[in-house]
Image (cartoon, rainbow, N blue to C red):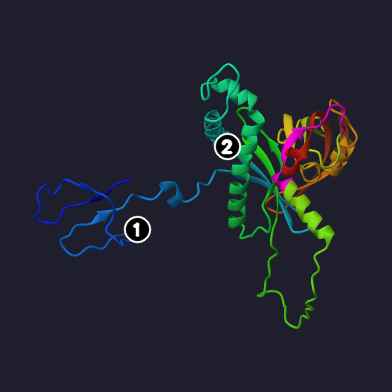
Amino acid sequence: MPYFVKPGKGEENPEKETPTEGPPAGADTEKVALPPGEGAVRVAPEDKEKKQEEKKFDYELIETSDKPGSIKVFKVHVPRMVYDELSEKTLKELKKSVVIDGFRKGKAPHTLMKRQFRKEINQDVMNELVPNVTDQILQKENLAKFIDPILDESKVEEGQPIELTISVEIIPKLDPKHEDYTGLTITAGERKITDAMVTGELERLQKQNASIEPKEEGGVVEKENPIVAHVEVRDEHGHKIPTHCGRDRFFTNLETALPEPVWKEFLGKPRGAKVEVAIDEERKKPTGETISKKEIWNVEIVEINVRMGVCEHL
């Protein structure tokens, strides 16, 4: 990219910029200092995207709960418009590199691409959406994450806000103003790294970075399997609970996304199986108030998936 030097005062055509081969020898990449009257060098601007602050996506925090092991679980709603904009951006990038039979590269119909790569587009959107929203929540609540967040459940329905259930392990807080930490005795022992610890960490990383593929025909639900299901939940009076209901709901972590009696009922069931479970549910509002109520869950298993690690694709 050429650099431009403005002529000094008194030179001809003072408003015309003349290109040079490059900045003066030894010039700083950000600013070039020249003797008085010599003009100034304008260096090509940096990538604007790098300078701009990361965009923060709109969201609404619906519910917060705590799990053992310093785990925070957030249920949030994201405007449908945000999801659609990210989907379109992902689709445009995808069209540049994907070739579909019968069409030249980049010329496949928009609707065909969207339908054929629905899962891939959704996964890319979630990979961008989940950490962004989680970081905003943690910043507002003055919390720090220990590891990256995990998407336990997503509910994507046409014309409706996107519902996400996100779990993240946080760093516990110390409160020296109100807690007495004096007189504590700490014994620092030698920490041994065992094969089991290494295996556990590798499994965690594999799970975090794994792709999700359909389980082989005839397979049944196991605890670690992500599933797609039609869900209908009613209260004790027979009224639907809209926030729980939906078709083609995608659950990546059964333990954290669903009540224990519900996900345990899935185990060993094949695709197409239907279950009905009545539970007494307790929910905690952001205000801290606890609500008890009875719920009837009717669930149909539409799809059973498995996580495929990098090595399993090779």
Q: Is residue 208 magenta?
A: yes
Residue 116: image x %, image y %?
A: 64, 24
Q: Quadrant of residue 252?
A: top right
Measuring 78% from the left and 46% from the top, which residue is drawn there? 256
For marks 1 and 2, the one nearer the N-term is: 1
Q: Is residue 218 magenta?
A: yes
Tell whether 184 sits left or right of 77: right
Which numbered tag is attached to residue 156? none
Mark 1, Cα crowd under 10 Å, few <14 / some 14-19 / many 20+, is few
Q: Is residue 157 visible?
A: no
Residue 15: image x %, image y %?
A: 15, 47
* The one of 249 and 21 positioned closer to us in this rendering: 21
Q: Is residue 65 above or below residue 241?
A: below
Tell whether 32 sits left or right of 182: left
Residue 170: image x %, image y %?
A: 69, 58
Tell whether 5 sits left or right of 240: left
Which numbered tag is attached to residue 79? 2
